[in-house]
Amino acid sequence: MSLRAFSPMLVAEKPLVGKSKDKDKAGIQCMEWCCRSLYLGGKDSVVHHLSLATTAAAAQVTDPATAPPDVREVNRRQMGRSGAVLQLTAIPVLNHLLVLWDGSVSALHMFSLEPVSPLKKIQNVSCMMVSDSVSSSEPVYVELVTASARRRCLSLHRVYVDRWECLRQLPLQQEPLAVAMRGPSICVATADRYLLHDFQSGTTLELFQHGLARQNLVVKTAEEREFLLNGPGSLGMLVMSDGTSQRAPVPWPAAVLDGAVCYPYVLALLGQAVHVYSMLDQQLKQTIPMQKATTLISTAEGVFVIAERELHCLRPCPLEEQIEALVEAQRMDQALLLLDGVRDRLPTHSYKELRRTISCLSGLMHFYQESFPEASQLLQEGHLDPRELLRLYPDMGTICGDFGSQLPPLSCSRDLEEMSREDQASYRHFLLFLADFLSSVRGVAQAQVCLADVDTALVRVYLQAGMSDRLLQLVSSANHCHLDICIQDLRQHKRSFALGLLYQSHGQHFNAIQTWVEVAEGRRDDDSCATDVYHHILGVLRRLEDTDRDTFWSYADWALTRDQEVGVQIFIPGPEEPVPPVPSEEIIAFLQKYPLALLTYLEYLVGELQSKEEAHHTLLALTYVAQLLLQKGSGETADGHTHTQTHTHTLTQSTDGNQHTHSEPYSLREKLQELLWQSDCCDVRAVHDKISNTNLHTERAILLGKAGEHRKALQILVHKAKDRQAAVDYCWRTSAGQERNCRHRLFLSLLQIYLDSAQSVVVATDLLNDQSAAFDAAAALQVVPVDWSVQLVGRFLREALREAFHRRRMKEVETGLAMAEQRRARDVWTKTRNTMVKLEKGTRCHACQRLLSRPEFVSMPTGELLHLHCSTAATVTVTGTRSLS
């Protein structure tokens, strides 16, 4: 069999007695075990009291479980002249031994075997059963169930130390053949069926019919509130006291003579052997030869087997030894099943240690069988030291150093080194399993003792398996890799970008950036790198801590030399990144030799950081001017439209005076104009001096407008820039947010400039007619030449009259609304003033809750009454003087 669960041992042998040498009268009929005392009931009506003690010689035996006991007869009692003693039951709490002989139950003293005189015999009993529980009340009693085949009934008794009493009886339709009791529940076997009865509730439940012969009936107690029955179809049924079954039945042979339960096993007695079945998987585990056996009795000492003239004891082997035997036989599944089934019967530390070892060994067996999901689960449950797995792989043993395995070898192991040479496809499956297993245990306790070995092995596995994404994720995050080993491996596989990430994760930023620079410049090969290395370097430089400033400045020149407009991003943090601690003046000084980068950085200071420093605004404006002049010198137009454009938002003024925000490409010149319009910190004089001798006429006009010289600004726009729309926009934008008179003055000045210049009449009339809402009509008509016809300014006159009528009517509406509001307020005031206020005796102030003892008080609009001094924080609507009633 697959397991040695019990060790058989001969306990006692009944010799032949009497002159007749009659074997039938010398046999053992029943037995009872209690506290190292053994009671035997013979077929010759004799009750023997034996004492069992292990001899000194037996104590030296290697296996104490098989040590033969020292049996010594203490006493005996002859119950009568003939008839077998059918049943013995000890009640140690009362020192009683109940004897079923000659159809009656007698009570003897457990030690002297003398009859207990107060307890008379219970007649007409065919079998009996004592409850396993003892009452907690006084006097102490034990419940006894007797079955009478003649009367076809069950009787429930209470057995006291000096008496017993019958509580109730249960009549049956058939005679009871066997009975077992667990608590208040009684299981009875009759000629064709099994019954369950609860004496507390009085309910009876018919379980099932059996169709068995009398000698094949089995009704035995099992675990708590559970019974073992020989069911139909040759099944050992385990039935709970409520009639349900929580365990699968045991498929034992048909000719079972008796059964017993010794957890986790069910024993079935056949003619020549005892079969041992597991309650956990219902499989046959052991067969014990046993000649002429008739009865099985389960006790705390083991399972006793009554043969014709011999008494044997099947002692259970220690559970730890059974489990270890299964492990040695490499029956890991059975070992795990048995271990989990007897968990509550083992010390906690023993269970955990066995569970860990068995899970690891079982996981390794699944591992060699390529059942990788099951292997991973078992190895993690067993908290396998990852080095146990690493040492199995070629090229991984050097990482573990002098680590020695703590697990026994397995016969099913495979040589992975040979597999790596001869079967690359299968070996890759093992590599992928190792990668997944090490990744899953990195954060758990089992890997804490060898974190560096785990991470180093992962790097090597990812390289061998070509798992680029997982390699980059590992080396870019916090890790405990052995740098010397991993650097060598990464260089060997030409993974320079990953090598830089490894340097970075260990705080070696200079080495990391140097490695990436060599990749970006083509001095290192890395075909697996799909990342834009240059932009990655910029991101790393931007995120360097203040303690790495030397590294930052060492590679800032390289970043800007490669691309000024992109490289300047190292000085500009991302949306969720903190502003670099480097002073802006230091950065500006560094960027002087990189004009495009300087321009981008100044735009960041002024536009995003909203810097209010005059130097930043002025330098940005001068940088715009310098770039525009540089473009002009290189053959480009002064307006800069050949420059690369960027999308931004600009604020313009429409002809109706409303502001509109729209998105359009901004050239350098448009950026300069927007800066001059919006900035209040720019040094106007310095910028004006810079552009005074250039053709940046619009910019000069904006600067003059900032200085309040609006007429000069308009003259430049009209005569130098020759931009009619720019002049109109200037008037609207300058007067935005100002009083109406400001806009009237600006447009009137523009009209006068057109009239005083050699401009055609069409320009002046177009200005009047198109921007009629911007003029003071009376003032405009005073400067208009008298020789102009009405047709020239007809549209202006119509718009002016319409505007005048509109303003007058709006004032009338506003006046009417104000008068209506005044009348409404006066009406409310009048009604409130004329309201009567009744002040009764005992009225209290709403604010301080004191009595109003004086005739002066304040009445609030909501009806509350206050003292005069309490109303300072309230809005008073009526003040009245009343006499207290």
Image: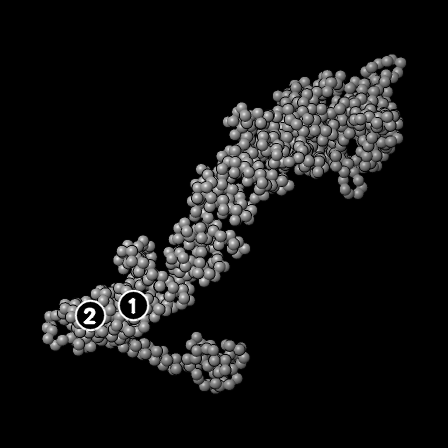
Residue 691: x and y in percent read 30, 66
Q: Which mark is residue 376?
A: none
How many numbered callouts? 2
Q: Determine if residue 232 is in view.
A: yes
Mark 1 belongs to which amino acid? Ser
Left or right, 51 with respect to 464, comes to right
Residue 45: x and y in percent read 84, 22
Which color scheme is applied?
one colour
Q: Earlier in the sequence, mark 2 or mark 1?
A: 1
Image quarter for residue 753?
bottom left
50 and 527: which is toward the camera: 527
Q: Determine if residue 208 is in view.
A: no
Mark 2 belongs to which amino acid? Ser
Left or right, 591 with respect to 41, comes to left
Determine the residue positioned at 31% across, 79% down: 823
Image quarter for residue 750?
bottom left
Q: Which residue is mark 2?
A: 772
Q: Which residue is mark 1?
A: 692
Element under disc 1: loop
Above or below, 562 against 8 in this view is below
Element under disc 2: helix
- Separation of residues labelled 2 and 1 (CA atoms): 34 Å
